């Protein structure tokens, strides 16, 4: 697969993402890390 072009204009990128419903996604914190003892016992 080849890249044939890039979209560099912010207004166009925003229009495309708004049309797809992807412009207003809210970021959230990552899940809390699991303690090492729990991950070790699951892999055995």
Image: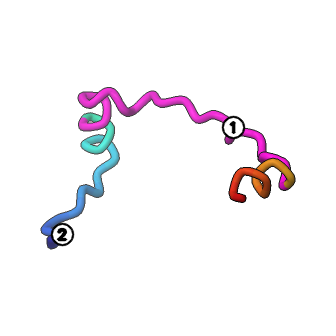
Front-lying residue, 25 or 13:
25
> Which quarter of the figure has residue 28?
top right
Residue 27 in the image, given as x and y percentages of width and height: 58, 35
Main SS, magenta residues: loop
Residue drawn at 70 percent across, 39 percent down: 31
Q: Is residue 33 magenta?
A: yes
Q: Report x, y in % for residue 40.
A: 78, 57
Query: 2 or 43: which is nearer to us?
Result: 43
The span from disc 1 to disc 2 (Cα, nearest Å) is 33 Å
Q: Is residue 1 above or below residue 44?
A: below
> Residue at label 2?
3
Residue 40 to residue 2: above or below = above
Camera-nearest label, 1 or 2: 1
Category of crowding for the residue at label 1, using alpha-carbon neighbours closer than 10 angstroms: few (below 14), some (14–19), many (at least 20): few
Q: Which residues are magenta?
A: 16-36
Q: Is residue 7 left or right of residue 2?
A: right
Q: What residue do we see at 25% from left, 43% from top? A: 12
Is residue 33 positioned above or below 5 on the image?
above
**Furthest-bottom residue in view?**
2
Quadrant hosting residue 5? bottom left
Q: Position of residue 37 (x, y in %)?
A: 86, 52
Which residue is at 72% across, 59% downward? 44
Q: Quick one: quadrant of the N terminus?
A: bottom left
Residue plotted at (29% across, 51% down): 9
**Residue 6 or residue 2, whichever sits in front:** 2
Is 7 left, or right, of 23 in this rendering?
left
Mark 1 sits on what residue? Answer: 29
Relative horizontal placement of residue 4, taking residue 18 as reference (left or right): left
What SS does tag 2 mark?
A: loop
Q: Nearer the viewer, residue 39 or 19?
A: 39
Residue 14, position as x, y percentages in the image:
32, 38
Which element carries disc 1, helix, strand or loop? loop
């Amino acid at each position: 697969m080849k890249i044939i072009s890039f979209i560099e204009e912010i207004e166009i990128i925003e229009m495309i993402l708004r049309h797809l419903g992807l412009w207003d996604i809210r970021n959230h914190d990552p899940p809390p890390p699991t303690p090492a003892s729990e991950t070790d016992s699951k892999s055995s």
